[in-house]
Amino acid sequence: MDAIQMNLLEQVSGLHEVPEGAYNIRANGEKAGRNTTANIDIVTKEDKPGIDIIIKPGTKNESVHIPVVLSQSGLKEMVYNDFYIGEGADVTIVAGCGIHNSGDADSEHDGIHSFFVGKNAKVKYIEKHYGEGDGKGSRILNPQTIVNMEEGSYMEMDTVQIKGVDSTERVTKAKIDKDATLIIKEKIMTHGTQVAKTDFEVELNGENASTHVISRSVAKDKSSQVFLSSVNGNNKCHGHTECDAIIMDEAKVSAIPKINANHIDAGLIHEAAIGKIAGEQLMKLMTLGLTEAEAEAQIINGFLK
């Protein structure tokens, strides 16, 4: 991998070098490196682009890194990655995609990640998207995440996109069984004329299933964002969805949370708030010696932390 690709790798996965444990690194549509362990296997799909990640039951304190980097202008790809997490496993999965586009053609990475989380398994999933480059071509990322959770399982998703992505449509669909919990934390920042849309749909099917969907976003300049969330309570369950957004300049933000109670013991809550940075917050920081721009940056960093 060249210097540009290594920088992208660091931005999306925090890696300065090849990681320990299981990993699959994809660069410009090709496999750039792979390693498996005794408990985690990674297999190339034969019928379409993508991989199967197979985690044995009972696997503990192991991680999988599956970053993607694109540095070739005009490259467009679609990949399908399936994760099979065995019963009682406890693992961390680090994904993400970085695009460097210095050309005039659009560069695009689309991916469908399907998770099959076994009984009593625990998963921490981290995904970061990043774009850079001074070309006129757009940097486009469209991730789709499909989650199937068995009884007693737990999954936490941390997704971040705070720089350089011109267009994104992020879709997450989940089905949650008895005593299982899904936590989703999303952070997005857009600027210029960038466009971002997120769409969450969670089915709380099992007794005592639960979910908590949290979105924090900042829209600057003439960018636009749309947040959609739908939580369906189909049993005795608990669901909470919230969206907080800071709007600046000439940006546009829409938040459309929806909850559907299909059972008498479904407890569901939704919240949404959109507003500008409060003037008193800026003044307080400026009295400490910060410029207005520095004060805004401090507030935004704290909001997205």
Image: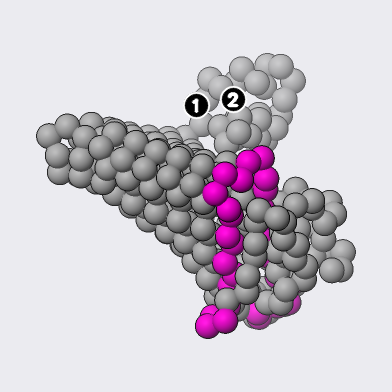
Q: Residues within 10 Å of mark 1 (few under 14, many from 20)?
A: few
How did the renderer colour the structure? one colour
Q: Is residue 192 above or below residue 110?
A: above
Residue under the image location 23 percent in, 31 percent down: 267
Q: Is residue 169 above or below residue 11?
A: below
Q: Position of residue 173 (x, y in %)?
A: 37, 56
Tally of marks: 2
Q: Nearer the viewer, residue 115 or 239?
A: 115
Residue matched to label 1: 278
The quarter of the rendered structure image containing the N terminus is bottom right
Question: What span is colored magenta in the figure?
Answer: 46-75
Q: Position of residue 252 (x, y in %)?
A: 42, 50
Asked if the residue at tag 2 contacts the one at tag 1, i.e. Cβ–Cβ closer than 8 Å, the answer is yes
The dot on residue 282 is: 2
Q: Nearer the viewer, residue 174 or 12?
A: 174
The quarter of the rendered structure image containing the C terminus is top right
Q: Nearer the viewer, residue 143 or 280?
A: 143
Q: Position of residue 165 (x, y in %)?
A: 60, 60
Q: Is residue 145 visible?
A: no
Image quadrant assignment for residue 79: bottom right
In this rendering, would 87 be left or right of 178?
A: right
Amino acid type, callout 1: Ala
